[in-house]
Image (spheres, rainbow, N blue to C red):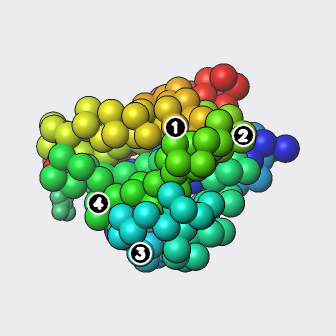
Amino acid sequence: MKKILVLNGSPRKDSVSSALGESLVSAAGEAEIKKYNAYKMNAKPCMGCGYCDKNKGCCFDDLDEFMLDFEQADYFVISTPVYNSGVPAPLKAIVDRFQRYYALRFAHGVKPPVAKHKKAALVIAAGSKGEGKDEIKAMFERQFTVLNTELVSTVFFDGTDTRAPDENTSAVIAQEGESFFNS
Ligand SMILES: Cc1cc2nc3c(=O)[nH]c(=O)nc-3n(C[C@H](O)[C@H](O)[C@H](O)COP(=O)(O)O)c2cc1C
C-alpha cells in the first residue's frame, strides 16, 4: 500500500493550507497516511554543529520518527502558508533539519542518501498575492534534488485576506490530487 507523509506548516485550527492539503490527499485512495503539523512538532533548529558530517544522523533525536516516516514514504505532501516570503519558522526549522541527508550524500558518499524515491506535492496559501511563493517552491525543489524527491504538483491559493476556498476549489484540488497520486 502506498505511504503518504503529510506535513502542514500552519499554526491555525482553521488553516486554509491544511484544508487544501486535505482536499489533495482525499484523492489518494487506499493508502497509509501519516500527518504532522510543524507547530506541534516543536523541532529543534539545526545548530550547524557538523555532527551529521562525522556521524550518520543528527545530534538531536526529536525528529527521528518523522524522518523515518519520510524515508519510508512514497508521497510527500507539504502544505504551508506564506509568511514574509517564506515558510513559517517551525516549518523552516524542519526543512533545515534535512541537513542530515546532505551530509550523508556529500560527507559520507551515500548516493542516494534517501533510498526510496518520492513524489512531492506542495500546497501554498497566501493572504494577498503571495509574493514569495516562487521562493518557497524553489527552496523545496532545490532541497528535493538531494532527497531523491521529485516535486510533481504545486497548488497555490492566494487572496485569503478577502476570500476563502469554496467547494469548487476543493474539487479542483482533489482532481489535481488524483493525477498526483496516479503519476
Ligand atoms: C506572520 C505572517 C506573515 C505573513 N506573510 C504573508 C506574505 O508575505 N504574503 C502573503 O501573501 N500573505 C502573508 N500572510 C498571510 C497568510 O499567508 C495567509 O493568511 C494564509 O492564507 C494563511 O494560511 P493558513 O490558513 O494555512 O494558516 C502572512 C501571515 C502571517 C500571520
> Residue 33: where, in percent of width, then height?
70, 54
Q: Residue at x 62, y 69 (%)?
A: 64
Q: What label does residue 44 carry, if any?
A: 3
Of badges 1 and 3, nearer the viewer stands 1
Callout 4 amino acid: Pro
Quarter assignment of residue 91: bottom left
Q: Is residue 21 left or right of residue 80?
A: right
- Please determine whether, in this image, residue 36 is positioned above or below residue 141: below
What residue did someone put label 1 on? 146
Check disc 2 and report its element: helix, strand or loop: loop
- Alpha carbon distance from label 1 to label 3: 22 Å
Callout 1 amino acid: Val
Q: Residue at x 56, y 43 (%)?
A: 105
What residue did someone put label 2 on? 116
Q: What label does residue 77 carry, if any?
A: none
- Alpha carbon distance from label 4 to label 1: 22 Å
Check disc 4 and report its element: helix, strand or loop: loop
- Alpha carbon distance from label 3 to label 2: 25 Å
User: Is the residue at mark 4 in contact range of ligand 1, meaning its CB lies under 8 Å from it?
Assistant: yes
